[in-house]
Image: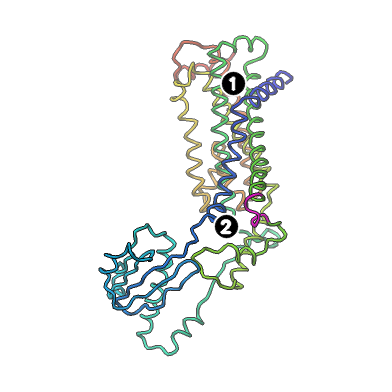
Amino acid sequence: MNKISIIILREYLTRVKKKTFLIMSIVGPLLFAALMIAPAWLAQMEDKEEKLIAVIDSSKLFYNTIPETKYLKFEYLQNTPISKIKQNFSKTNYYAVLYISHIVTYKPNAVQLFSDKQPSLAIKMHISNALEKEIERLKLKTYNIENLDNILQSIKTNISIQSIKLAEDGTEKKSSVEIAMIVGYLSGFLIYLFIFLFGAQVMRGVIEEKTNRIIEVVISSVKPFQLMMGKIVGIAMVGLTQFLLWIILTAGIVTVVKTAFFPELSMKTEQITPETVLSSGGSTLQPSQPVNDAEIDQVKEIFSSVKSINFGVLFASFIFFFLGGFLLYGSLFAAVGAAVDSETDTQQFMLPITIPLILAIIVMMNAIQNPEGPIAFWFSIIPFTSPIVMMVRIPFGVPYWEVSLSVILLVITFIFTTWLASKIYRTGILMYGKKTSYKEIWKWLRYNN
C-alpha cells in the first residue's frame, strides 16, 4: 500500500507541475466565466438606437395596432405606393418598410419587411405577434359579439404551474424542471468530459513510459498492479484538483469582472428580489409596463426552486460518480495503453470503451426529458453509463434505493474491470514490437500467473 501511495504522489506532483495543467487551470475558468458574463455584456452592448419603421397597410385594418417600444417606432403612411418608397429608401431615415397586403387575413405570407439591413428576429416576432392578435380580434368581431374588446381583455389569463414534489411522509417541496434540467445536463456533461480528458492522459502516460522503456526499471521495484492503481488514482486526484480550481477561479473571475465592469449586476443576494429581477431584465423590445403579480410569483417560484436543491448532496454525488466512473474507465484506458506501442494503434481498442460513453450522452438527453422512464432508469443502473445518466437524474430526485444500487454495481464493476485490466497490464506492459490483437489479449486474460 505504501508503494501505491508513493506512485499516486509521484503521478500527482508530476502532472500538476506541468505547463499544460497550469494553462488549462487558467484557460478553463476564463472560458466558463466568459460563458457566464457574455450574456450580460452583450445586453449592455445591445444596439439602443431608435429604429423607425414605415408601415404601408393596403388592407386598412392595422392602423396604430402595432405597439411601439422604447427603441422601435412605427410611422403609418397613407396613399403612398410601396414601389416609390423602395426606390427612394436610401434617401429616407427609415430602418425598414413594412408592407401589409390586403389579402393578409387569408394569406399569412402577405406581409413583407423591406430594409437595407438584416432585421433581427426580435423585431420580426414583435410585428408578427401584433398582427396575429389583431387578425384574431377582427375575425372574432365578424360574429357580432357585443363588447368584444372588453370580453377579450377580461378573459386574458396567465397560468403558471408550480411543481411540488411529495415525500413519502407527505411533506411538500417545491421544484423546478427547468433548473433540474440545466444542473443535470451540466453535471453529466462535466463527468463525460473529465473521464475522456483524464482517461486519455492515463493511456498516453502508460504508452510514453512503455516506449521510453522506463517501465522496465519501475516494475523491478513495484508490481504492475500497484503501478496501474497508483497511476489511475493519481491522475484522478489531478482531475479533482483541476475541477475544484475551475470552480474557485471561475467564481472569482466572475465576481471581479462583475464588480469592475458591471457594478449594477453585483447586487448582494439579499437585495435581489423578484421585483428587481423583472424590472431590470426586460427586453428592449418590450414596452415599459408595471410588473404584474403573476410575473412576480413566477420569479419567486424560481428563487425557491433554486434554494430547494441540495447542492451538498449534488456535489458529493458528483465527486463519487466522477471518481467511480474515472476509476472504471481509467483502468480500461490503462489496459489499452499497455497493450499497444503507440497512440496510432489504440483506435481498434478504443471503440469498445468509447461506445458506452457516447451512448450515455445520447441517453442523457432522454433522461432530461423523462428522468423516471425505463431507459433513464436502466442506464443509470448499468455501471458503464451510470456515472453520467445518474448525475442527470439526481437533481430531479431519485429514490435512495436506486442510487444505492447504482453505487454498489459501480463499485463491483470497477473492482472487476481493475482486476481484468491488471491481467492485461502486467503482460502487455513488457510486450514490444508485436502487433496486438483481441485474440492476443484473450490469451493474456487466460494466464494464471
Residue sitting at the far front: 91
In the picture shown, does residue 407 fall above or below 371? Answer: above
Whether residue 165 is visible to the viewer of this picture, yes or no, is no
- Rounded to the nearest angstrom, the CA distance separating label 2 from label 1 is 43 Å
Q: Position of residue 10 (x, y in %)?
A: 68, 21
Q: Position of residue 2 (x, y in %)?
A: 74, 19
Q: Position of residue 25 (x, y in %)?
A: 62, 34
Mark 2: which amino acid? Val
Q: Secondary structure at mark 2?
A: helix
Quadrant placement of the N terminus? top right
The label on residue 177 is 2
Q: In the depicted view, which residue is nearer to us: 262 or 173?
A: 262
Residue occupied by mark 1: 422
User: Could you tell whether 408 is left or right of 157 in the image?
Assistant: right
Whether residue 263 is in magenta: the answer is: yes
**Taken as a whole, is the magenta stretch helix, strand or loop?**
helix
The label on residue 235 is none
Residues in magenta, as a range: 260-266
Query: What residue is rendered at 64% in x and 56% in y?
Result: 265
User: Could you tell whether 135 is left or right of 4 in the image?
Assistant: left
Determine which quarter of the picture holds residue 125. bottom left
Whether residue 211 is visible to the viewer of this picture, yes or no, is yes
Mark 1: which amino acid? Ser
Sequence-wise first label, 2 or 1: 2
Query: What residue is rendered at 48% in x and 58% in y?
Result: 47
